[in-house]
Image (cartoon, rainbow, N blue to C red):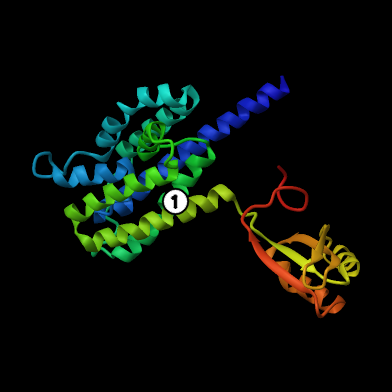
C-alpha cells in the first residue's frame, strides 16, 4: 500500500511540475516574447507568427492559445499510435495546460520602449525554467516534440534532437521574413538560453569536479584526501607507457569549492603528480545527491 501511495505521490508531483512549467512558459510568452515579436521556435513560435499575420483580419490577431491548440490536436492520434499512451497522455496534458495558461494570463507590455536585449535574456531564462520544469515532470508541451517524434518514426537514421532543431530553424527562418533579421537574431539568444537553462534544471545543481591523479605516492595522497577532505577515492591499476611501470590512478569526485584544497593536498604529498580535472555535470550517490 505504501509503495502504491509513493508512486501516486510521485506522479502527482510530476503533474504539478508540468502545471507550474506551462504557467512559466505562458508568462515568458505573454510578458516578454510575444510583445516584441520574438520567435522561440516550436508551435508557440508559429502562434506568434500567425498572430502577427492575422492582425489585419482579427482584432489584435489570432490569440496564441487558439493557434497552439489547433496545431497540437491533429498530432495527438498520430503520436498515440507511434509512441504509446503514456507519452501521448502527458503531451495532451502539457499542450492543454499551456493553451489554458495562455488564455488566462494576460498579454502585458512591460516596457514602454522595448529593449530587445533585456527581453531576449529574461524571455529566454523564464522560458528555459518553464521547459525544464515540464521536462522534470516527464511531460512535453507538444509542438516540435510531437512533430519530431513523428518524423523520427519515418526517418529513424536522423536523431530526434536534430529533427527538432531542424524544425525550430525552419520556424525561426519564417520569423525572419515576418519580423525582420534584427529581432530574429535576438530570438536566437532566446533559443540558446532556453536550451541552457532547461538543461541545467534537468541536471540539477549537483555539478562537481572529477579528478584523475597519477602519482608514485598514490597511497599517501588517497590517505590525505580521505583524512582532510572526507572524500572517497578509487584506485585503478594502470601502466605508464613511457616508463613501462605500473601505477595506481586515483579517481576522486569533489565539489567545485574543494578544488583548491585538494590541489594543496596533492602538491604536499607529491609535487610531481599528474592531475586531470574534469567537469561532472551530475553526480548521484553518497556525499552528493541520493539516487
In percent of width and height, residue 143 lies at 35, 37
* Position of residue 116 in the picture relative to residue 90 (left or right): left
Name of the residue lying farthest toward the top: 1
What quarter of the picture does the C terminus occupy? top right
Q: Is residue 209 above or below residue 41?
A: below
Name of the residue lying farthest toward the left: 56
* Position of residue 7 in the picture relative to residue 248 (left or right): left
What quarter of the picture does the N terminus occupy? top right
Q: Which residue is mark 1?
A: 128
| Residue appearing at x 77%, y 60% in the figure | 252
Name which quarter of the figure residue 193 lies in: bottom left
Could you tell me which secondary element the residue under label 1 belongs to? helix
Count of labels in the image: 1
Q: Is residue 208 above or below residue 151?
A: below
In percent of width and height, residue 60 lies at 16, 44
Q: Is residue 274 visible?
A: yes
| Residue appearing at x 62%, y 29% in the figure | 9
In percent of width and height, residue 72 lies at 32, 31
> Dot 1, crowdedness within 10 Å: few (<14), some or many (≥20)?
many
Q: Is residue 184 above or below residue 52?
A: below
In percent of width and height, residue 160 lies at 43, 41
| Residue appearing at x 32%, y 54% in the figure | 32
Q: Nearer the viewer, residue 55 or 207?
A: 207
* Position of residue 57 in the picture relative to residue 289 (left or right): left
Name of the residue lying farthest toward the bottom: 271
Q: Is residue 41 visible?
A: no
Amino acid at each position: 500500500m505504501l509503495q502504491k501511495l509513493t508512486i501516486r505521490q510521485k506522479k502527482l508531483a510530476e503533474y504539478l511540475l508540468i502545471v507550474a512549467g506551462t504557467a512559466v512558459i505562458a508568462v515568458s510568452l505573454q510578458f516578454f516574447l510575444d510583445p516584441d515579436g520574438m520567435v522561440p521556435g516550436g508551435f508557440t513560435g508559429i502562434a506568434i507568427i500567425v498572430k502577427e499575420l492575422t492582425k489585419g483580419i482579427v482584432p489584435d490577431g489570432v490569440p496564441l492559445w487558439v493557434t497552439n491548440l489547433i496545431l497540437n490536436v491533429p498530432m495527438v492520434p498520430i503520436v498515440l499510435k507511434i509512441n504509446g499512451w503514456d507519452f501521448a497522455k502527458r503531451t495532451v496534458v502539457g499542450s492543454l495546460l499551456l493553451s489554458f495558461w495562455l488564455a488566462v494570463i494576460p498579454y502585458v507590455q512591460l516596457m514602454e520602449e522595448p529593449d530587445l536585449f533585456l527581453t531576449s535574456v529574461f524571455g529566454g531564462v523564464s522560458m528555459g525554467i518553464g521547459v525544464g520544469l515540464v521536462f522534470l515532470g516527464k511531460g512535453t508541451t507538444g509542438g516540435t516534440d510531437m512533430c519530431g517524434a513523428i518524423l523520427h518514426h519515418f526517418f529513424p537514421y536522423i536523431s530526434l534532437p536534430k529533427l527538432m532543431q531542424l524544425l525550430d530553424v525552419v520556424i525561426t527562418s519564417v520569423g525572419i521574413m515576418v519580423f525582420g533579421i534584427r529581432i530574429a537574431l535576438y530570438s536566437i539568444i532566446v533559443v540558446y538560453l532556453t536550451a541552457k537553462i532547461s538543461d541545467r534544471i534537468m541536471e540539477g545543481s549537483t555539478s562537481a569536479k572529477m579528478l584523475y591523479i597519477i602519482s608514485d605516492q598514490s597511497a599517501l595522497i588517497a590517505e590525505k584526501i580521505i583524512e582532510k577532505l572526507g572524500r572517497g577515492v578509487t584506485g585503478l591499476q594502470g601502466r605508464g607507457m613511457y616508463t613501462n611501470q605500473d601505477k595506481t590512478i586515483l579517481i576522486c569526485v569533489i565539489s567545485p569549492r574543494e578544488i583548491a584544497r585538494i590541489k594543496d593536498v596533492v602538491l604536499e604529498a607529491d609535487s610531481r603528480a599528474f592531475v586531470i580535472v574534469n567537469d561532472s555535470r551530475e553526480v548521484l550517490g553518497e556525499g552528493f545527491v541520493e539516487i
